Amino acid sequence: MLEAPVVSSPALPLAGRHIVLGLSGGVACYKAADFARELVKAGATVQVVMTDAACQFITPVTMQALTNRPVFTSQWDARESNHMPHINLTRGAHAVVVAPASADFIAKLAQGRADELLSLMCLARPRETVPLLVAPAMNREMWAHPATQRNVAQVKADGATVLGPAAGDQACGEIGDGRMLEAHELRDELTAFFQPKVLAGRSVLVTAGPTFEAIDPVRGITNHSSGKMGFAIARAAAEAGAQVTLVAGPVHLATPRGVRRIDVMSAEQMLAAVLPEAKRHEVFVATAAVADWRPASAATQKIKKDGSGQVPMLAFVENPDILATVARLPAGERPFCVGFAAESHDIVRHAREKLARKGVPLIVANNGPATFGRDDNALVLVDAAGERELPPGDKLSLARALVAEVALRVLPQRA
Ligand code: C5P
């Protein structure tokens, strides 16, 4: 029987996914409750399995209430008619996530031990179709111990994905590596895990947001770009397996996980940040709404009104075109360049002009005034071969579709 395709949306990024959530013993079990809630809110169905040690930290009652499913804690559970919960629970699941994964539990995984339901179930899962993800949670000394590091390396070699751990304050009062990732971080990691790795091993540079061109120390000119499209592209590229650098103008957006971010203010600063990076990246996506002009010179002190009614005259100079500059780099240093065109009318005609003027292989056209600051958008891809519309949608779904299109264009051509 063919499985129904999993269709997700940013509101329900895990819709249609069935996740087996395993809890081993650790204080971080309290975060697992929140994680279960995040999974359910993201559209997943969640089956919880807990070790005895996990039940010392949080009750199955809580986990059952949050997931709306009875929790399994024992391989002797008679509720399964064939008496085989360790087999039945993973069949049809899209992933097993063990969060928290204690040092002891990781050691068991590394050795293939199976003396209670959770480890038994991990061992008995179909490895080809049900991936295992583990979120370690332990004291920093336990994490740093060579035995744990050896076990983690073994578990990875056996095909598991290790999420985190993070560094920071620990329940024991010490500070260091070993904290379990937060619930929303685990949710985003799992969402990213399910994205196709079409840019694995590739590198992508993105500019995003407006620029701010100073008039004096307290004023400047800027625009309404929110940076959301560029940040969505950076996130989608990272989810697709690329190494991503994001050069961002002044915006109030969280950096997508796994993305390296460089903050700038002006167009000149953006160019200075982009140029050395462009030579190190294979793809450059310019989404920034770079100001066309800047004041010829920024006053070092606040320009005061003097009561005379005279308005100060500002002289402007043109800003460098960052995209065109990168597109002119010599072959070998030049990434595959993707430009954006925010237009209010004749969208495709203007995009085609821009393709030629900037010397780039792909322009993504959108309706600028209609999309600034919004979460949804509609895009038209314009290149030498023609035009292709990406159906209207939220910016993250469009970013994923665009990343897939870019991947097709930068993949080595098959003979
Ligand atoms: O020329 P225009 O601003 O319409 O072109 C838009 C495209 O060029 C976008 O991809 C934008 O990020 C990029 N651009 C740039 N540097 C500029 C102006 C635009 O990189 N100074």
Image (cartoon, rainbow, N blue to C red):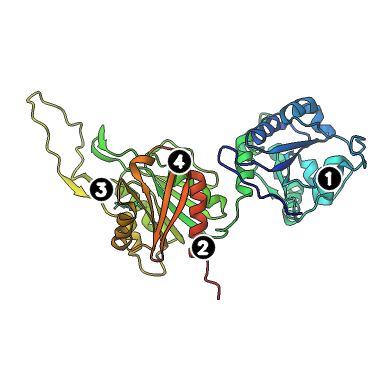
The amino acid type found where label 3 is placed reads Asp
Relative placement, left or right, of 164 versus 312 is: right
Mark 3 lies on a secondary structure that is: loop
> Which label was assigned to residue 121?
1
- Kind of residue indicated by mark 4: Asp
**Front of the two marks 1 and 2:** 2
* Quadrant assignment, res 2: bottom right
- Figure check: 94 above or below 300: below
**Label 4 vs label 3, nearer the camera:** 4
The residue singled out by tag 4 in the image is 376
Indicate the quadrant where residue 135 lies.
top right
Q: Is residue 308 left or right of residue 381?
A: left
In the rendered image, which quarter contains the C terminus? Answer: bottom right
Q: Are marks 3 and 2 in contact (CB under 8 Å)?
A: no
Q: Is mark 2 within 8 Å of ligand 1?
A: no
In screen coordinates, is 152 left or right of 321? Answer: right
Q: According to the image, label 2 marks what residue?
A: 408
* Nearer the observer, 237 or 267: 237
The residue where tag 3 is placed is 292
Give the foreground label among 1 and 4.
4
The residue depicted at 52 percent of the width and 69 percent of the height is 412
Q: Residue at x 76, y 41 (%)?
A: 103
Name of the residue lying farthest toward the top: 307
Work out whether mark 4 precedes mark 2 in sequence or the reverse, and give the earlier one: 4
| Mark closer to the chain start, 3 or 2 | 3
Relative depth, front residue between 91 and 184: 91
Tell me where residue 232 appears, x and y as whole percent: 48, 45
